[in-house]
Image: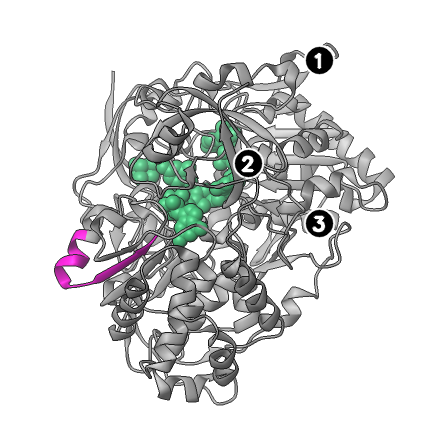
Amino acid sequence: MTTKKIKTYCRFCHAYCPMEATVEDNRLVAIAPDTDNAVYGGYTCIKGRQLGEQIYHPTRLQQSRKRQADGSFAPIGSEQALDEIAAQLQAIMAEHGPRSIASYNGTYSYQNSAAHGVARAWHKSIGSPSYYTSVTIDQPAKVAIGPARMGFWNAGSHMWCDADVAMIIGNNTLVSHYSIPGGVPSFSPFNALREGKKRGVKVICVDPRKTELAARADLHLQVKPGQDAALIAGIIQVIIAQELYDKDFCAEHTRGLQQLEAATRRFTPELVAAAADIPVAQVLEAARIFAAGPRGSAVTGTGPEMGPHPNLLQHLVQALNAICGRHYREGERLPNPGVLTPPGPRRAQATSPQPQWLSQGTRSRVSADIGELFVLSPYGPLGEMPTAVIADEMLTPGDGQIKALICVGGNPLLAWPDQEKTLRALSGLELLVCIDLKMAATAQLAHYVLAPKMCLEREDVTLLTDIWHDQAYSQYSPTVVEAEGDKIEEWEFFWAIGKRMGLQMSLDNGPIDMDNKPAKFDLLKNITAGSRVPLEQVRQSDGGQVFPGMDIIIEPADPATRGYLDLFPDGLEEELAAAYRDAQTADPGNFPHLLVSRRMKNTYNSTGPELSLLKDKGTTNPAFMHPQDLAALGISTGELIEVYSAHGRIPAVAAAADDIKPGVVSMSHCWGGSPDPAAGTDARVRELGSNTNRLIDNREQAEKYSGMPRQSTIPVAVRKPG
Ligand SMILES: Nc1nc2c(c(=O)[nH]1)N[C@H]1C(S)=C(S)[C@@H](COP(=O)(O)OP(=O)(O)OC[C@H]3O[C@@H](n4cnc5c(=O)[nH]c(N)nc54)[C@H](O)[C@@H]3O)O[C@H]1N2
Ligand SMILES: Nc1nc2c(c(=O)[nH]1)N[C@H]1C(S)=C(S)[C@@H](COP(=O)(O)OP(=O)(O)OC[C@H]3O[C@@H](n4cnc5c(=O)[nH]c(N)nc54)[C@H](O)[C@@H]3O)O[C@H]1N2
Ligand code: SF4
Ligand SMILES: [Mo]
């Protein structure tokens, strides 16, 4: 028997914690934090420490499956499955055209650095624009709409490591391990927060729940959900009125300040405090602390970005950063320009808004307002279609109707807004293929389910997080154990289908060898070609490394290309008017509670509940409510309740939590099972949890450009089941 210790990193979530694996004869026998890694200091969470259980779990698919005429699934060799799928795709394309062929690339497609590039290459080679990801039902205002409407600062805004203050709006890194630079870093977040606070960083947390972060903040605004845009408009107003903003920066780099000032004047501290149900003094205090800075950013997370007015909120948050001048300037040091991203100078200048990004691409067939979104990336803007209306694109007959879906590491039946519509849409497809570790809710509807390799069974590199770190950090992991059974990587699927269809596929940096399957490393080299540090050098390091001497000094603006940030783009007036109306409306009608989303420690969206180590930690998705609210309804913790909205109703398990603002129901998404009554999932709510997307109408109050529905801040009522 041979025993090996291999340095690797966890890819259960995108924190990419360094790990040390112990392998005996190609079997993972232990997985532990890599305590040699200085950036993470041995940090991991329970989800990473159980990877050994997950890799050998009985629910894990060992080979592909094909749906039979009676609805059951039978094993099928992956080569055979790929032959059949390629033939069916070709037939569907011949009859309905390329747009009818779609892929949805969910959260786990992001955990394989080669998956998106090869999937895009395949779409390009068949000429199908129907490329979808989970990002467009996550925070599209942040990554696609904001930059197009306001423009962006080339050198970036202040990161946590350089901050004196951080305003963190509906983002809970201590559980989610998610933040954009400026918020609490995802990498060993408790430590990062502790160190920041020692340095004197003032944290303002805006959240209806006293979260793990709020409990450690200097100021917690325990807001009523859905009023963030009004609140930030009010804070901007205070900062301008008290002349606490950066006048030089505004004069040099922005346009529209006067209009913004005039249009936000009606958002008085009294009005926004009443709307958000917080003391007026807290609004003034938040404005004062943030403006005092002098460095640090305001950032948002999913809570408010899924609520009302996300495009407006995102704009106002970026406007707040802009008027306070929270951007890296000429001569300053940029801590991490990226290890594997393309080099090039970073300049102290704005790129002007690109409103054409919001109208130039493929339009949705179901709404004139909505179309292709261009997600900003280190490689430039990348187009994708909005997932918010993908179910409608499947259900609406006519040219371009989606007939085939390839679902990669995602779980639409639980994740997409409007669960019943999603079920109808997926059930009507001519071909549904899932690449999934288990027979997830969506996989159970598929014609073919392909078994993927899990993270420790494939080599990879931390490309996704390359520019999220505040140091030039990167880790390459070799394959830790060879996959058993008949399993493939996500990119191999697209390559194999492309080869069978006779396509020539190309990545941005060059063609893919279609005769012989490329080695993963060569693909990654192609994807990262020209990077600051060559991929080979990253591979040579044993474990994650900081690459010294990589920080760069921000260069002066180039007069030929310098632009401006638009503080008052087209449409803002109407959006502010709508937020103003909402801020004044107090009558909740028949739905006195607001249901908001949250993340749970032991699961990652729908991944985790099947794992005993995680489940034993008490995992399900209760409806957390304030004890007063439960008492008023005569409901106790653990009782079954019904939560209903204007659109649907779900069973849930009540749980009292005094960290929730009264009037709010806090409940995690991506739980439960099929809404088909025949599936009987409602009766198993205590075991499976319950799906909040049944409460959502995906077209009502949909946001312009993205179609984002209200996936959070849903007006609901709660009752005992009758
Ligand atoms: N109402 C409401 N809806 C929401 C949200 C919300 O807050 N509220 N959140 C939204 C957000 S932010 C997101 S990102 C989406 C998530 O949307 P999705 O990405 O569609 O959902 P997940 O549950 O993350 O799906 C992950 C799937 O990948 C499988 N999987 C796990 N590991 C692997 C692997 O290594 N390889 C492969 N191929 N598959 C694997 C899992 O079994 C699971 O089926 O949901 C969105 N929907
Ligand atoms: N353990 C774990 N980690 C995860 C995930 C998971 O499911 N589990 N999911 C991953 C995914 S897909 C994503 S996108 C990221 C998301 O990462 P985050 O955005 O940090 O997600 P949450 O932890 O849900 O934090 C959102 C916060 O918004 C608050 N909130 C809700 N409504 C409002 C509102 O109207 N206004 C304000 N100001 N706050 C509001 C909620 O109370 C909650 O504390 O997390 C990722 N990480
Ligand atoms: S935070 Fe947990 S799940 Fe995420 S990478 Fe680290 S160990 Fe894995
Ligand atoms: Mo997400």
Q: Which residues are magenta?
A: 194-206
| Location of the C terminus (image quadrant) | top right
Crowding near pointer 3: few (<14 within 10 Å), some, many (20+)? some
Residue located 53% across and 46% down the image: 588
User: Badge 1 is on which residue?
Assistant: 68
Residue 82 x %, y %: 67, 28
Residue 334 x %, y %: 30, 70
The answer to which image quadrant residue 381 occupies is bottom right
Whether disc 2's CB lies below 8 Å from ligand 1 is answered yes
Give the residue furthest to the left.
198
Q: Nearer the viewer, mark 3 or mark 1?
A: 1
379 relative position to 159: left or right: right
Residue located 22% across and 40% down the image: 43
Indicate whether residue 669 is drawn in magenta.
no
Residue 265 x %, y %: 46, 77
Residue located 50% across and 78% down the image: 260
Residue located 50% across and 15% down the image: 684
Name the residue nearer the viewer: 182 or 290: 290
684 relative position to 399: left or right: left
The answer to which image quadrant residue 111 occupies is top left
The CA distance from mark 1 to mark 2 is 26 Å
Dot label at residue 623: none
Crowding near pointer 1: few (<14 within 10 Å), some, many (20+)? few
Q: Nearer the viewer, mark 2 or mark 3?
A: 2
Whether residue 294 is visible to the viewer of this picture, yes or no, is no
User: Badge 3 is on which residue?
Assistant: 125
